[in-house]
Amino acid sequence: MTRTVEFAGTTAVVTGGASGIGRGLARALLGAGCRVVIADVDEAALATTARELGVLGVRTDVTDPDSVAALADRAVAEYGEVHVVCNNAGVGPFGPVSRLGLDDWRWVLDVNLHGVVHGISAFLPVLERNPDWGHIVNTSSMSVLVTPPNVAPYVASKAAVLAMSEVLAAELAEAGSRVGVTVLLPGAVHSNIKASLRSRPATSGSGLYDVDLAETGRLRFIEPDEVGAMVVDAVRDDELYVLTHGEFRDQAAARAARVQAAFPAAPAPAGS
C-alpha cells in the first residue's frame, strides 16, 4: 500500500539503544524529527545515553516479554503513539559448537531472536493503530550471508531474524498494511558487542567468550551514525534490506551461486 513517511512529531523506540548501532539509530531518528525512546538492559549506560541525547530511557530486558510489553505501554503513555520500533538489542560472543552448552545457545537465542519476537508481538498492534504509517526495523547481521566460524548461535539467531522479517513483510504487504519492515544486516560497526558477556546472568561452565574484532585489523569498521542514516533512508523509502558493507557482495554472491547450483533440474511441464 502506498504511504508517505513523515518523521517529524512521531515516536520511535530503539532497543539496545544505549550504545553502538542502537545509539546510532536513536541519533538518526532524532535528527529526522522523531521523539525517541531508548531501551537497554544496562541501566548505567542507558541513563548516560538518555541524558546525552535528551530522550526517554526505559530499562528493558528483551528476553522477558512482559518487560518489552511494559516498554510499549510506557512509550504510548508518554507520547500517545509509536511509528517506528527498532528491535536492535543483541549479543555476539564467540565459541566453537563443540564447546557450547545448551544454556549458551538459549541465552544467545533468547536475546537475539526472542527479543525480536517480543518486540514484534508488543509493538505491531501499536503500529497498526496508526492511520498513516508504521515501521519495524529488525537487526540481523551480514554474517548470515558470509558465515564465519565460532559464532554459530549468533549466526543462527540472526538468520532467523532475517527470514522472520521477510515473512512478516510479505504478510503485511498481502494484508494491505501501512506497516513496513526493514531488516538491517550490518557488517563491522563500532559497538559494545565485543563485551557481550557483560549482560549475561551469572553462569558456570560456559563455552562462550568475547572477542574484539577491531583488534584483528581484518575488517573495515564503520560508525553507528552511518548505519543510523542508512536505516532512516530505508524506512522513508520502505526498503526491506539494509546492507552496510559492499566488500562482502562477492562472497555473498558466491554463496548464493552454490545454493543455486545445488537445486535439481525442474521437471518438465506435464504434457510436454
Image (tube, rainbow, N blue to C red):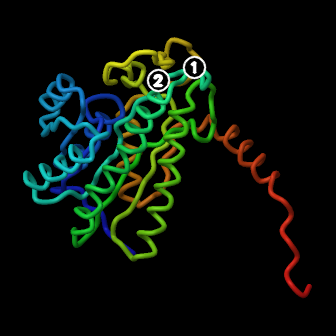
Q: Which residue in the protein does label 1 denote?
A: 99
Quadrant into which the C terminus falls: bottom right
Reply above or below: 28 against 76: above
Q: Which residue appears at 46% of the width and 75% of the height? A: 174
Residue 93 — which label? 2
Disc 2 on helix, strand or loop? loop
The image shows a total of numbered marks equal to: 2
Nearest to the eye among marks 2 and 1: give it: 1
Could you tell me the amino acid type at mark 1? Arg
- Give how far across and how far down residue 26 sits, in percent: 26, 40
Residue 74 on image: x %, y %: 12, 49
User: What x and y, as percent, mark residue 105?
Assistant: 48, 32
Residue at x 54%, y 44% (from the top left corner): 159
Compared with residue 105, is residue 234 higher up or lower down, i.e. above or below? below
52 horizontally vs 179: left or right: left
Kindly indicate the quadrant of the structure image that contains residue 23: top left
**Residue 20's quadrant in the figure?**
top left
Q: Residue furthest top?
A: 215
Is 167 located above or below residue 40 in the figure?
below
Q: x, y percentage for residue 17?
A: 27, 35
Q: Which residue is located at x 19 percent, y 29 percent?
A: 46
Give me the C-alpha separation between circle 2 and circle 1.
13 Å
Give the quadrant of the N terminus: bottom left
Decide which of tag 2 and tag 1 comes sooner along the chain.
2
Element assignment for label 1: helix
* Along the viewing direction, whichever of 226 and 10 lies nearer the viewer: 10
